[in-house]
Amino acid sequence: MTTPATRAAQQHLNVSRRSFLRGLGVSLALPAMESLFPTRLLGAEASAGQLGVTATGRPLRTAFVYFPNGAIPASWWPATTGADFALSPTLEPLAASKQHLQVIRGLGHQAAEAAHEGGNDGGGDHARATGTFLTGTRLRKSQTDIRNGISIDQLIAREIGHLTRFPSLEIASDTIRKAGNCDDRYACAYQYHLSWTATNTPLSPEGNPRLLFERLFGTGTAGQRDALLLARQQQQRSILDFIRDDARAMKTKLSARDQEKLDQYLTGVRELEVRIQKAERLGLPKDPGVDTPAGVPIEYGEYVGIMYDLMLLAFQTDSTRVISFMTAADGTNRSFSEIGVPEGHHDISHHQNKAELVAKVAKIEHWYAAQFARFLKKMADTPDMDGHSLLHNSQILYGSGCADGNLHSHSNLPILLAGGAGGTLQPGRHVDHGPQPVTNIFLSMADRVGLKTLERFGDSTGRLANV
C-alpha cells in the first residue's frame, strides 16, 4: 500500500535524480511534436529569408559519409544513365532507396592527384584522398606544418550552427590517429580527419558510441560525461529511467499521434542504449592488453550500425543539421572475415586485376553500401512534421576520395547523393556530369542550405547543375 509518506519520498527521489542529472548537464533531446510546435511555423513563410530550412520550414539536414579505398569501377557504376537505370552489383543493397538516390558520375579531386599544377608530391594518395575529400584543397606535404582548407561541412556549420545545440557533429567508426607520419610523409591529421575548421585545424571525429550518445543526451564537458558514465555504471540505470516521469508528464500535452511518436522514439533510444551497453560488456574483456574504450563494439558491423543510428537520432532531435561520418580512413587494412574476406582491405585493393581479389574487394564495397542502405531506409521511414520523411528533408553525400584503389586515382570518384533536400533535388537517377570538381556539388548543396552568396569553394569551377 502506498502511503502519503511513501509518495512524498518517491517524489523527493525523482526531484533529486532530476537535479542530479541537470547538474551534470543532462537533458533529453526529443523529436519535434506537432502538438507543441506553432502551426504558423509549418508554412512556407517560416523559411522566408532563413538559412538551414526547407520550404515547409523543417530543418534541412546535411551529411557527408566517407567509405575507404575507392570502388571497383565495373561493379560500382550502373550500365545506363537516366531514371531507368539498373543498380550495379555493388549498389544492389540500395534497391529499397533507389527512388531517393542519385548516382553521381564524373566528379573528381584533381588536388588529390600526385601531379598537380606543375608539381608532383609523389606517394601519399590515401592521405590526400581523405584530407582533400571535403576541402578540395591541395595538402601541404608535411608531418608537422599541416595546411589544408576549411571543409564544406564546417562552412555550412558556420552559417547555421547557431540554430542547433551542436553546430556540427564529426563521427567515425575507426581508430583516429592525430599525430605522426601516416602516409609517405603526410601527417596523420590528413588521413584521419574529414572536417577542417581552419587551414591548420582538423576536427577530430568522435569514435566512441557511448561518448557520442552522452553528448546528445547528457551534454557537458568531457569531465562531466565521465562522471555521468561512472554514475550510470554504478547505479545500473539508464538515462531514460531517470527522466521517465518528465516524458510521462509531457505526454499529457500531446495528441494521440504525437504520443505514439514519442513512444516510438523513446523505444528506439532505449534499444540503442541497450546495444551500447551490450557492446561495453562484450568489448571490455577482449584483448586485455589493449586499452579498448568503453562503448566500442568488437563486431564492426554493429559499430558502424550504431554510429548510423546515432546520426539518425541527432537529425531526428534537431541536435545538429550538419554531420560528417568517416566509416574508416582511406588506406585502412581492416579484414572482413565475417563476410569471407580475411585479407586486409588495403592489401587486396591493389589487386592487379586478379579476378579473385577483385571479387573480394567488391564484396567489401557491397558491405559498406548495405550499411548505408539500412541508414537510408530508417531515414525514409522516420516521419518529419511536414508529412514528409527525414530523408526527404535531407541531402546526404556518400563517397570515397579514391576512385580505383588499384590505381590510386582520384578522377570519376564513386559518389551518391541521397535525399530530396526538401524537394529541391531530383533523386532516382544516374547522371553523368562529365569531368568536374567534386567541389561543384558542394556549392549546389550549400545553395540548398541557403548559402547562395558563396561564389567559390576549394577548386570549384561553378555549381553542379541538374541535381
Image (spheres, rainbow, N blue to C red):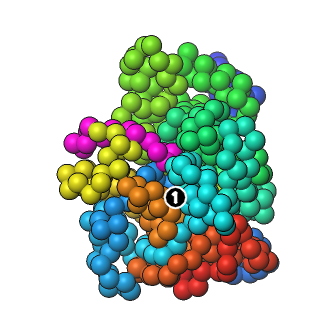
Dot 1, crowdedness within 10 Å: few (<14), some or many (≥20)? many
Q: Give the residue type that dot 1 points to.
A: Gly
Q: Where is residue 456 shown, x and y percent of the image?
A: 74, 74
Q: Is residue 336 magenta?
A: yes
Q: Is residue 102 left or right of residue 131?
A: left
* Quarter of the figure with the C terminus: bottom right
The residue to which callout 1 is attached is 401
Q: Quadrant of residue 5?
A: top right
| Residue at x 78%, y 59% (from the top left corner) | 158
Q: Residue at x 30, y 68 (%)?
A: 74
The number of numbered discs placed on residues in the rendered structure image is 1
- What is the x, y in percent for residue 16? 70, 24
- Viewer can see residue 388: no
The residue depicted at 45 percent of the width and 51 percent of the height is 68
Q: Residue 112: horizontal and vertical position, in percent?
A: 58, 59
Q: Is residue 151 magenta?
A: no
Front one among 69 and 202:
69
Q: Position of residue 28 (x, y in %)?
A: 63, 42
Q: Nearer the viewer, residue 132 or 311?
A: 132
As rendered, which of 232 and 164 lies closer to the eye? 164
Quarter of the image for residue 172 reads top right
Examine the rendered structure and indicate whether residue 107 appears above or below residue 30. below
Secondary element at tag 1 = loop
Residue at image coords 40%, 79%: 430
Residues shaded magenta = 324-342
Taking the image as drawn, is residue 14 in sight? yes
